[in-house]
Image (cartoon, rainbow, N blue to C red):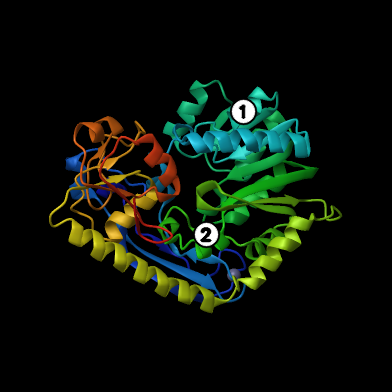
Amino acid sequence: MLASTRKAPVQRTICRGCESDKLERFLDLGEMALAGGFLPDTEAIASEEKYPLSTHVCRACGLVQILEVIDPEILFQNYSFSSSTVGPLVQHFQDYAKWLQQKFHPELVVEFGCNDGILLTPLGELGIRSCGIDISENITEIAGSKGLDVLTGYFEESMAERIMDRFGEADVVTGSNTFAHNDHPEIILEAARRVLKPNGHLCLELMYAGDLLEMIQWDTLYHEHLTFYSLSSLQVLLKRCGFHVVDAERHPMHGGSLRVTAALDADEEGQPGVAAILEYERSKALADPDTWINFGQHVDRKIEVVRETLGRLSHNSRIWGYGAAGKATLWVNACRMAYLEAMVDASPLRAGKLMPGTHTPIVFPEELRANPPDYIFISAWNYGDLIRSKEGWFQGIWLVPLPDLRFF
Ligand SMILES: [Zn+2]
Protein backbone atom coordinates (compact mmCIF):
# COMPACT_ATOMS: atom_id res chain seq x y z
CA MET A 1 0.00 0.00 0.00
CA LEU A 2 2.88 2.35 -0.76
CA ALA A 3 1.98 5.89 -1.84
CA SER A 4 3.97 5.49 -5.05
CA THR A 5 1.68 2.65 -6.18
CA ARG A 6 -1.46 4.67 -5.66
CA LYS A 7 -3.84 5.18 -8.52
CA ALA A 8 -7.08 7.07 -7.95
CA PRO A 9 -10.15 4.81 -7.87
CA VAL A 10 -12.04 4.58 -11.14
CA GLN A 11 -15.59 5.81 -10.71
CA ARG A 12 -17.96 3.58 -12.65
CA THR A 13 -21.07 5.30 -13.98
CA ILE A 14 -23.01 2.43 -15.56
CA CYS A 15 -24.36 -0.79 -14.07
CA ARG A 16 -21.95 -3.71 -14.03
CA GLY A 17 -24.78 -6.09 -14.93
CA CYS A 18 -27.00 -4.39 -17.51
CA GLU A 19 -25.09 -1.20 -18.44
CA SER A 20 -27.94 1.11 -17.38
CA ASP A 21 -26.94 4.50 -15.96
CA LYS A 22 -29.87 4.57 -13.52
CA LEU A 23 -27.88 3.98 -10.34
CA GLU A 24 -29.10 5.03 -6.92
CA ARG A 25 -26.83 5.44 -3.89
CA PHE A 26 -28.22 3.96 -0.66
CA LEU A 27 -25.24 3.73 1.71
CA ASP A 28 -22.29 6.05 2.12
CA LEU A 29 -19.48 5.04 4.49
CA GLY A 30 -17.29 8.01 3.60
CA GLU A 31 -13.54 7.55 3.27
CA MET A 32 -12.57 4.00 4.26
CA ALA A 33 -9.25 2.17 4.50
CA LEU A 34 -9.09 -0.94 2.34
CA ALA A 35 -10.71 -3.82 4.23
CA GLY A 36 -7.79 -6.13 3.39
CA GLY A 37 -5.12 -3.43 3.74
CA PHE A 38 -3.45 -4.81 6.88
CA LEU A 39 -0.30 -2.82 7.61
CA PRO A 40 2.98 -4.70 8.12
CA ASP A 41 4.30 -2.25 10.74
CA THR A 42 3.93 1.26 12.17
CA GLU A 43 6.19 2.69 9.44
CA ALA A 44 3.51 1.86 6.86
CA ILE A 45 0.95 4.10 8.59
CA ALA A 46 2.28 7.25 6.92
CA SER A 47 1.53 5.93 3.44
CA GLU A 48 -1.84 4.35 4.20
CA GLU A 49 -4.58 5.45 1.80
CA LYS A 50 -8.33 5.79 2.32
CA TYR A 51 -10.89 5.70 -0.46
CA PRO A 52 -14.54 6.74 -0.79
CA LEU A 53 -16.92 3.84 -0.21
CA SER A 54 -20.57 3.97 -1.16
CA THR A 55 -23.05 1.40 -2.42
CA HIS A 56 -25.61 1.74 -5.20
CA VAL A 57 -28.53 -0.19 -6.62
CA CYS A 58 -29.41 -0.29 -10.32
CA ARG A 59 -32.95 0.88 -11.02
CA ALA A 60 -33.08 -1.23 -14.19
CA CYS A 61 -31.89 -4.70 -13.05
CA GLY A 62 -31.70 -4.36 -9.24
CA LEU A 63 -27.96 -5.12 -9.03
CA VAL A 64 -26.31 -3.92 -5.80
CA GLN A 65 -22.81 -2.59 -6.48
CA ILE A 66 -19.92 -0.45 -5.33
CA LEU A 67 -18.87 1.99 -8.03
CA GLU A 68 -15.45 3.06 -6.70
CA VAL A 69 -13.10 0.58 -8.35
CA ILE A 70 -9.67 0.29 -6.75
CA ASP A 71 -6.82 -0.98 -8.93
CA PRO A 72 -6.76 -4.78 -8.34
CA GLU A 73 -2.94 -4.60 -8.21
CA ILE A 74 -3.34 -2.61 -4.99
CA LEU A 75 -6.25 -4.65 -3.66
CA PHE A 76 -5.07 -8.19 -4.17
CA GLN A 77 -1.31 -8.19 -4.77
CA ASN A 78 -0.49 -9.04 -1.18
CA TYR A 79 -3.84 -10.44 -0.27
CA SER A 80 -3.57 -11.83 3.24
CA PHE A 81 -6.61 -14.07 3.24
CA SER A 82 -5.50 -17.68 3.05
CA SER A 83 -8.72 -19.71 2.92
CA SER A 84 -7.24 -22.93 4.25
CA THR A 85 -6.62 -21.36 7.67
CA VAL A 86 -10.40 -21.11 8.18
CA GLY A 87 -11.79 -24.46 9.38
CA PRO A 88 -15.43 -24.06 8.25
CA LEU A 89 -14.27 -23.04 4.76
CA VAL A 90 -12.15 -26.17 4.44
CA GLN A 91 -15.23 -28.27 5.19
CA HIS A 92 -17.32 -26.23 2.76
CA PHE A 93 -14.93 -26.86 -0.11
CA GLN A 94 -14.63 -30.57 0.66
CA ASP A 95 -18.41 -30.74 0.37
CA TYR A 96 -18.39 -28.57 -2.75
CA ALA A 97 -15.84 -30.87 -4.45
CA LYS A 98 -18.10 -33.87 -3.77
CA TRP A 99 -21.12 -31.93 -5.03
CA LEU A 100 -19.31 -31.09 -8.30
CA GLN A 101 -18.29 -34.73 -8.71
CA GLN A 102 -21.79 -36.09 -8.17
CA LYS A 103 -23.55 -33.51 -10.31
CA PHE A 104 -21.21 -33.24 -13.30
CA HIS A 105 -18.72 -36.19 -13.19
CA PRO A 106 -16.12 -33.75 -14.53
CA GLU A 107 -12.77 -34.69 -16.05
CA LEU A 108 -11.40 -31.18 -15.80
CA VAL A 109 -12.44 -28.36 -13.47
CA VAL A 110 -11.05 -24.84 -13.89
CA GLU A 111 -11.27 -22.58 -10.87
CA PHE A 112 -10.64 -18.85 -11.09
CA GLY A 113 -9.69 -17.15 -7.84
CA CYS A 114 -8.39 -20.47 -6.49
CA ASN A 115 -6.76 -18.90 -3.42
CA ASP A 116 -4.41 -21.37 -1.71
CA GLY A 117 -6.00 -24.43 -3.34
CA ILE A 118 -8.79 -25.00 -0.84
CA LEU A 119 -11.03 -26.51 -3.57
CA LEU A 120 -8.28 -27.91 -5.84
CA THR A 121 -6.98 -30.07 -2.98
CA PRO A 122 -10.22 -32.02 -2.32
CA LEU A 123 -10.87 -32.23 -6.09
CA GLY A 124 -7.48 -33.92 -6.46
CA GLU A 125 -8.32 -36.30 -3.62
CA LEU A 126 -11.43 -37.33 -5.57
CA GLY A 127 -9.28 -38.00 -8.64
CA ILE A 128 -10.54 -34.98 -10.59
CA ARG A 129 -8.00 -33.04 -12.64
CA SER A 130 -8.08 -29.32 -11.98
CA CYS A 131 -6.38 -26.06 -12.84
CA GLY A 132 -6.49 -22.98 -10.63
CA ILE A 133 -5.98 -19.31 -11.45
CA ASP A 134 -5.37 -16.47 -9.02
CA ILE A 135 -3.94 -12.97 -9.36
CA SER A 136 -2.20 -12.92 -5.97
CA GLU A 137 1.29 -14.28 -6.46
CA ASN A 138 1.90 -14.89 -2.77
CA ILE A 139 -1.27 -16.99 -2.68
CA THR A 140 -0.53 -19.00 -5.86
CA GLU A 141 2.92 -19.74 -4.46
CA ILE A 142 1.25 -21.40 -1.47
CA ALA A 143 -1.01 -23.41 -3.81
CA GLY A 144 1.93 -24.32 -6.08
CA SER A 145 3.96 -25.54 -3.12
CA LYS A 146 1.20 -28.10 -2.48
CA GLY A 147 1.81 -29.55 -5.95
CA LEU A 148 -1.37 -28.08 -7.45
CA ASP A 149 -1.61 -26.80 -11.05
CA VAL A 150 -1.99 -23.05 -10.65
CA LEU A 151 -1.46 -20.10 -12.98
CA THR A 152 -0.97 -16.52 -11.81
CA GLY A 153 -3.01 -13.90 -13.63
CA TYR A 154 -6.51 -12.83 -14.60
CA PHE A 155 -9.07 -15.23 -15.97
CA GLU A 156 -9.46 -13.64 -19.38
CA GLU A 157 -9.17 -14.62 -23.02
CA SER A 158 -5.38 -15.11 -23.10
CA MET A 159 -5.53 -17.18 -19.89
CA ALA A 160 -8.32 -19.28 -21.41
CA GLU A 161 -5.99 -20.01 -24.37
CA ARG A 162 -3.16 -21.01 -22.01
CA ILE A 163 -5.48 -23.38 -20.17
CA MET A 164 -6.78 -24.92 -23.41
CA ASP A 165 -3.21 -25.48 -24.66
CA ARG A 166 -2.13 -27.13 -21.46
CA PHE A 167 -5.22 -28.96 -20.24
CA GLY A 168 -7.86 -28.95 -23.00
CA GLU A 169 -11.54 -28.05 -22.63
CA ALA A 170 -13.17 -28.00 -19.23
CA ASP A 171 -16.38 -29.60 -18.04
CA VAL A 172 -16.79 -27.11 -15.22
CA VAL A 173 -15.56 -23.58 -14.65
CA THR A 174 -16.06 -22.42 -11.11
CA GLY A 175 -15.34 -19.42 -8.93
CA SER A 176 -16.20 -19.20 -5.25
CA ASN A 177 -16.58 -15.78 -3.77
CA THR A 178 -14.36 -14.15 -6.40
CA PHE A 179 -16.64 -13.49 -9.38
CA ALA A 180 -18.18 -10.50 -7.63
CA HIS A 181 -14.74 -8.97 -7.01
CA ASN A 182 -14.34 -8.15 -10.68
CA ASP A 183 -15.29 -4.85 -12.25
CA HIS A 184 -15.75 -6.52 -15.65
CA PRO A 185 -17.59 -9.80 -15.03
CA GLU A 186 -18.23 -10.11 -18.77
CA ILE A 187 -14.48 -10.76 -19.30
CA ILE A 188 -14.62 -13.75 -16.92
CA LEU A 189 -17.78 -15.03 -18.59
CA GLU A 190 -16.17 -14.73 -22.02
CA ALA A 191 -13.11 -16.67 -20.81
CA ALA A 192 -15.39 -19.31 -19.26
CA ARG A 193 -17.30 -19.66 -22.53
CA ARG A 194 -14.02 -20.19 -24.40
CA VAL A 195 -12.65 -22.85 -22.10
CA LEU A 196 -15.87 -24.83 -21.53
CA LYS A 197 -17.10 -27.76 -23.59
CA PRO A 198 -20.42 -26.96 -25.37
CA ASN A 199 -22.27 -29.00 -22.72
CA GLY A 200 -20.11 -27.63 -19.87
CA HIS A 201 -21.24 -25.71 -16.81
CA LEU A 202 -20.32 -22.56 -14.99
CA CYS A 203 -20.77 -22.77 -11.21
CA LEU A 204 -20.55 -19.61 -9.18
CA GLU A 205 -20.67 -19.18 -5.43
CA LEU A 206 -21.48 -15.60 -4.54
CA MET A 207 -22.34 -13.61 -1.48
CA TYR A 208 -26.07 -13.23 -1.86
CA ALA A 209 -27.92 -9.93 -1.92
CA GLY A 210 -30.85 -11.68 -0.21
CA ASP A 211 -28.72 -12.49 2.85
CA LEU A 212 -27.09 -9.06 2.75
CA LEU A 213 -30.56 -7.61 3.09
CA GLU A 214 -32.03 -10.07 5.58
CA MET A 215 -29.04 -10.24 7.91
CA ILE A 216 -28.11 -6.57 7.43
CA GLN A 217 -24.58 -7.56 6.48
CA TRP A 218 -23.41 -4.06 5.67
CA ASP A 219 -19.90 -5.08 6.83
CA THR A 220 -19.41 -7.05 3.60
CA LEU A 221 -19.92 -3.90 1.50
CA TYR A 222 -16.31 -2.98 0.83
CA HIS A 223 -14.05 -2.22 -2.11
CA GLU A 224 -13.00 -5.84 -2.66
CA HIS A 225 -16.63 -6.97 -2.97
CA LEU A 226 -17.74 -4.86 -5.86
CA THR A 227 -21.03 -6.58 -6.58
CA PHE A 228 -23.84 -8.29 -4.65
CA TYR A 229 -25.89 -10.42 -6.99
CA SER A 230 -29.41 -11.59 -6.58
CA LEU A 231 -30.41 -14.46 -8.84
CA SER A 232 -32.56 -12.13 -10.93
CA SER A 233 -29.80 -9.55 -11.47
CA LEU A 234 -27.24 -12.29 -12.18
CA GLN A 235 -29.60 -13.79 -14.77
CA VAL A 236 -29.56 -10.51 -16.71
CA LEU A 237 -25.75 -10.47 -16.83
CA LEU A 238 -25.39 -14.18 -17.67
CA LYS A 239 -27.92 -13.94 -20.47
CA ARG A 240 -26.03 -11.01 -21.95
CA CYS A 241 -22.94 -13.29 -22.08
CA GLY A 242 -24.53 -16.42 -23.55
CA PHE A 243 -25.25 -18.43 -20.39
CA HIS A 244 -28.55 -19.37 -18.86
CA VAL A 245 -29.23 -20.32 -15.26
CA VAL A 246 -30.20 -23.97 -14.76
CA ASP A 247 -29.88 -24.36 -10.99
CA ALA A 248 -29.57 -22.27 -7.86
CA GLU A 249 -29.41 -22.92 -4.13
CA ARG A 250 -28.62 -20.96 -1.00
CA HIS A 251 -25.65 -21.79 1.27
CA PRO A 252 -24.53 -20.53 4.66
CA MET A 253 -20.93 -19.75 3.57
CA HIS A 254 -19.71 -16.21 4.36
CA GLY A 255 -22.93 -15.42 6.19
CA GLY A 256 -25.08 -16.41 3.22
CA SER A 257 -24.25 -17.30 -0.35
CA LEU A 258 -25.86 -18.34 -3.57
CA ARG A 259 -24.60 -21.26 -5.63
CA VAL A 260 -25.66 -20.81 -9.23
CA THR A 261 -25.17 -23.23 -12.12
CA ALA A 262 -25.36 -21.85 -15.65
CA ALA A 263 -25.21 -23.73 -18.94
CA LEU A 264 -24.14 -22.80 -22.46
CA ASP A 265 -26.58 -25.29 -23.95
CA ALA A 266 -29.78 -23.27 -24.40
CA ASP A 267 -31.89 -26.44 -24.37
CA GLU A 268 -30.80 -27.60 -20.91
CA GLU A 269 -33.75 -27.53 -18.56
CA GLY A 270 -33.78 -25.51 -15.35
CA GLN A 271 -34.17 -27.07 -11.89
CA PRO A 272 -37.01 -26.12 -9.49
CA GLY A 273 -34.55 -24.24 -7.23
CA VAL A 274 -34.37 -21.43 -9.79
CA ALA A 275 -38.08 -20.60 -9.70
CA ALA A 276 -38.17 -20.92 -5.89
CA ILE A 277 -35.38 -18.40 -5.37
CA LEU A 278 -36.80 -15.98 -7.93
CA GLU A 279 -40.13 -16.14 -6.09
CA TYR A 280 -38.36 -15.46 -2.79
CA GLU A 281 -36.66 -12.43 -4.35
CA ARG A 282 -39.99 -11.07 -5.57
CA SER A 283 -41.48 -11.52 -2.09
CA LYS A 284 -38.62 -9.50 -0.57
CA ALA A 285 -38.71 -6.85 -3.32
CA LEU A 286 -34.97 -7.37 -3.86
CA ALA A 287 -35.00 -5.47 -7.15
CA ASP A 288 -36.86 -2.47 -5.69
CA PRO A 289 -34.55 0.51 -5.01
CA ASP A 290 -36.74 1.53 -2.05
CA THR A 291 -35.89 -1.77 -0.35
CA TRP A 292 -32.23 -0.78 -0.43
CA ILE A 293 -32.79 2.81 0.60
CA ASN A 294 -34.57 1.52 3.74
CA PHE A 295 -31.70 -0.92 4.27
CA GLY A 296 -29.19 1.97 4.17
CA GLN A 297 -31.09 3.88 6.85
CA HIS A 298 -31.29 0.76 8.99
CA VAL A 299 -27.51 0.25 8.68
CA ASP A 300 -26.81 3.84 9.74
CA ARG A 301 -28.77 3.18 12.95
CA LYS A 302 -26.96 -0.13 13.64
CA ILE A 303 -23.57 1.53 13.31
CA GLU A 304 -24.69 4.28 15.65
CA VAL A 305 -25.78 1.78 18.36
CA VAL A 306 -22.45 -0.08 18.32
CA ARG A 307 -20.42 3.15 18.17
CA GLU A 308 -22.25 4.64 21.17
CA THR A 309 -22.40 1.47 23.29
CA LEU A 310 -18.78 0.42 22.89
CA GLY A 311 -17.58 4.01 23.05
CA ARG A 312 -19.19 4.32 26.48
CA LEU A 313 -17.79 0.97 27.67
CA SER A 314 -14.29 1.97 26.56
CA HIS A 315 -14.16 4.79 29.13
CA ASN A 316 -13.59 2.40 32.02
CA SER A 317 -13.08 -1.04 30.44
CA ARG A 318 -10.50 -2.79 28.32
CA ILE A 319 -11.85 -4.02 24.97
CA TRP A 320 -10.27 -6.32 22.40
CA GLY A 321 -11.55 -7.44 19.01
CA TYR A 322 -11.63 -10.98 17.61
CA GLY A 323 -11.34 -11.93 13.93
CA ALA A 324 -9.28 -9.66 11.66
CA ALA A 325 -11.32 -10.41 8.53
CA GLY A 326 -12.21 -7.68 6.04
CA LYS A 327 -15.47 -6.97 7.86
CA ALA A 328 -13.49 -6.11 11.00
CA THR A 329 -11.96 -3.16 9.14
CA LEU A 330 -15.42 -1.77 8.48
CA TRP A 331 -16.60 -2.18 12.07
CA VAL A 332 -13.54 -0.67 13.72
CA ASN A 333 -13.47 2.29 11.33
CA ALA A 334 -17.20 3.04 10.98
CA CYS A 335 -17.61 2.73 14.78
CA ARG A 336 -14.34 4.60 15.47
CA MET A 337 -12.85 1.90 17.71
CA ALA A 338 -9.38 3.39 18.09
CA TYR A 339 -9.62 2.32 21.77
CA LEU A 340 -9.33 -1.41 20.95
CA GLU A 341 -6.16 -2.70 22.60
CA ALA A 342 -5.69 -5.60 20.20
CA MET A 343 -7.39 -7.68 17.52
CA VAL A 344 -7.05 -11.46 17.85
CA ASP A 345 -6.55 -13.60 14.75
CA ALA A 346 -5.10 -17.08 14.30
CA SER A 347 -3.86 -16.52 10.74
CA PRO A 348 -0.08 -16.13 10.50
CA LEU A 349 -0.73 -13.91 7.46
CA ARG A 350 -2.43 -11.31 9.67
CA ALA A 351 -1.13 -11.70 13.22
CA GLY A 352 1.76 -9.29 13.77
CA LYS A 353 0.24 -6.70 11.43
CA LEU A 354 -1.94 -3.66 12.17
CA MET A 355 -5.62 -3.15 11.43
CA PRO A 356 -6.31 -0.80 8.50
CA GLY A 357 -7.42 2.66 9.59
CA THR A 358 -7.28 2.23 13.38
CA HIS A 359 -3.81 0.56 13.42
CA THR A 360 -4.84 -1.82 16.19
CA PRO A 361 -2.17 -4.53 16.62
CA ILE A 362 -3.27 -7.98 15.45
CA VAL A 363 -2.16 -10.76 17.80
CA PHE A 364 -2.35 -14.54 18.04
CA PRO A 365 -4.97 -16.08 20.39
CA GLU A 366 -2.20 -17.03 22.88
CA GLU A 367 -1.77 -13.34 23.71
CA LEU A 368 -5.42 -13.11 24.65
CA ARG A 369 -4.93 -15.85 27.25
CA ALA A 370 -1.93 -14.03 28.67
CA ASN A 371 -3.73 -10.70 29.08
CA PRO A 372 -7.53 -11.07 28.92
CA PRO A 373 -9.59 -7.85 28.61
CA ASP A 374 -13.04 -7.07 30.10
CA TYR A 375 -14.86 -7.27 26.76
CA ILE A 376 -14.19 -8.95 23.43
CA PHE A 377 -15.92 -7.56 20.37
CA ILE A 378 -16.41 -10.39 17.84
CA SER A 379 -15.89 -8.63 14.53
CA ALA A 380 -15.98 -12.03 12.81
CA TRP A 381 -19.55 -12.37 14.15
CA ASN A 382 -20.43 -15.02 11.54
CA TYR A 383 -17.98 -17.31 13.37
CA GLY A 384 -19.18 -16.06 16.77
CA ASP A 385 -20.28 -19.44 18.18
CA LEU A 386 -17.09 -21.10 17.01
CA ILE A 387 -14.88 -18.39 18.53
CA ARG A 388 -16.72 -18.42 21.86
CA SER A 389 -16.47 -22.20 22.18
CA LYS A 390 -12.79 -22.13 21.17
CA GLU A 391 -12.07 -19.54 23.87
CA GLY A 392 -14.44 -21.10 26.42
CA TRP A 393 -12.02 -20.23 29.25
CA PHE A 394 -12.69 -16.47 28.84
CA GLN A 395 -14.43 -15.04 31.92
CA GLY A 396 -15.29 -11.59 30.53
CA ILE A 397 -18.11 -10.47 28.26
CA TRP A 398 -18.46 -11.18 24.55
CA LEU A 399 -20.05 -8.62 22.24
CA VAL A 400 -21.61 -9.77 18.97
CA PRO A 401 -22.73 -6.92 16.67
CA LEU A 402 -25.10 -8.64 14.19
CA PRO A 403 -27.96 -9.21 13.55
CA ASP A 404 -28.38 -7.10 16.73
CA LEU A 405 -25.80 -6.08 19.29
CA ARG A 406 -25.78 -8.83 21.94
CA PHE A 407 -23.81 -9.48 25.13
CA PHE A 408 -22.76 -12.99 26.23
ZN1 LIG B 1 -28.41 -2.93 -14.00
Q: Which of marks 2 and 1 is in front?
A: 1
Image-quadrant location for residue 15: bottom right
Q: How crowded is mark 1: few (under 14 residues within 10 Å), some or many (20 or more)?
A: some
Q: Which mark is residue 283?
A: none
Q: Please provide percent x and percent y for residue 17.
A: 60, 64
Q: Please provide percent x and percent y for residue 82.
A: 44, 35
One can see residue 28 in this view:
no
Q: How far apart are marks 2 and 1 (CA)?
A: 28 Å
Q: Name the residue under label 2.
A: 227
Q: What residue do we see at 18% from left, 62% from top? A: 312
One can see residue 210 in this view:
yes
Q: What residue do we see at 25% from left, 62% from top? A: 309
- Ligand 1 shows up in the quarter that is bottom right
Q: Please provide percent x and percent y for residue 218.
A: 43, 61
Count numbered badges in the picture. Answer: 2
**Left or right: residue 73 compared with residue 88:** left
Disc 2 secondary structure class = strand
Q: Is residue 65 above or below residue 100?
A: below
Q: Which amino acid does label 2 sit on?
A: Thr
Q: Please provide percent x and percent y for residue 382.
A: 45, 49
**Left or right: residue 298 compared with residue 183:** left
Q: Mark 1 points at which residue?
A: 122
**Left or right: residue 167 compared with residue 38:** right
Q: Is residue 356 above or below residue 237?
A: above
Q: What residue do we see at 69% from left, 25% from top? A: 126
Q: What residue type is labelled 1?
A: Pro
